[in-house]
Image (cartoon, rainbow, N blue to C red):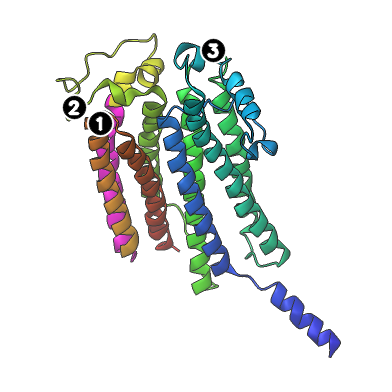
Amino acid sequence: MSASHSQSAFSRRSSPRPRSIALWLFCVAILVFAMVVIGGITRLTESGLSITEWKPITGALPPLSHADWMEAFDKYKQIPEYREINNGMSLSDFQFIFFWEWAHRLLGRVIGLAFALPLAWFAWKRAIPAGYGIRLFALLMLGGLQGAIGWWMVASGLSVRTDVSHYRLAVHLITALFVLAGLVWTALDLLTQAADTRARTARLTGFAVAAALVLFVQLLFGAFVAGMDAGYVANTWPLMNDRFYPAGVQWLGSFWATVTDDPYLVHFIHRWWAFVAAVVLIVLARRAKRAGSRGASIALNASVGTQVLLGIATVMSGIALPLAVLHQAVGAIVVASTAWAAHATGARRR
């Protein structure tokens, strides 16, 4: 009787829970989405360099006294951004930019805990289906690496530059979006398994890979535009300062340097590659619909259309903060919708 009871308890503890894990991953994905949005606000308000130290544990608390605030402010005064751009800034203005960077880092810590603690619990309960443990651990490690990438990005603007490297900002943003896509894809795999324990995981089709690469280029140049403030070089559409091809492009010594470092050309590429990406993603949406996922098709079509309109509106507004933040937020939704649609087309080929 006792042995039978113990075996029953062990059986309950070791029962896989794919649906529960999928719902948890969707919740983490929402947090990552919020992180991307706050990261956009941090960048647009030029707040990213306000905290000049990386303290993963003790840095969770903001300054709690006037003396603590003055100490943080004095450290900020030592970097080029303050000396060359914000010289004379008031303490209240510093507190404003400090808040956004602190909120961005705090949410990163929250995401880490929201992923690591439930993962440990599911592992202890032996609730993780076979084959998913390594994938979930890899996502955890990638999230931890993202924190280090964030500091690597900030460090680029603390000694010589008055802003962060747009290359490092691109790595930071794209890594976050990759994590978002990985969370959505894994959650969808788990939901499929919850419905049918014999179902295999979805595979990336050739077209889905091509669509992801086209979207990657658009995201990369979007990050470059943000990092270089290249959105400000023209506030008209479809022409850039009365010309289709901007007049301000300069040869910077090599093709790569010119394509990635000239703000006029970076803006031009991001502006028009968007339509290439839109066409490819709309085709992916149609394929998802044919594969039986009408929801993925609607989500991808709607997010892509909205994103194109927001991009145009953001440029014509002179990079108004609310529109620019919405543009980054919908960009994250495009990534999640692309993962959903790609998963649907891959699931068709089980």
Give whichever of 290, 50 is nearer the camera.
50
Give the dominant element type of the magenta stretch: helix, strand or loop. helix
Q: Which label number is shown at residue 236?
A: 2
Check disc 3 and report the residue beneath it. Answer: 160
Q: Which label number is shown at residue 315?
A: 1
Give whichever of 57, 75 is nearer the camera.
75
Residue 132 included in the magenta stretch of the image: no
Q: Secondary structure at mark 2?
A: loop
Using the rendered view, name the quadrant where residue 246 is placed.
Answer: top left
Residue 284 included in the magenta stretch of the image: yes
Q: Residues in magenta?
A: 268-293
Question: Which sits earlier in the primary sequence, circle 2 or circle 1?
Answer: 2
Question: Which sits earlier in the primary sequence, circle 1 or circle 3?
Answer: 3
Q: Mark 2 and 1 residues: CB-CB less than 8 Å, in contact?
A: yes
Q: Is residue 233 left or right of residue 63?
A: left
Q: Mark 1 and 3 residues: CB-CB less than 8 Å, in contact?
A: no
Give whichever of 74, 233 is nearer the camera.
74
Q: Secondary structure at mark 1?
A: helix
Q: Identity of the amino acid at label 2?
A: Thr
Q: Identity of the amino acid at label 3?
A: Val
**Does the rendering let one see residue 75?**
yes
Residue 292 in percent (x, y) is at 33, 66
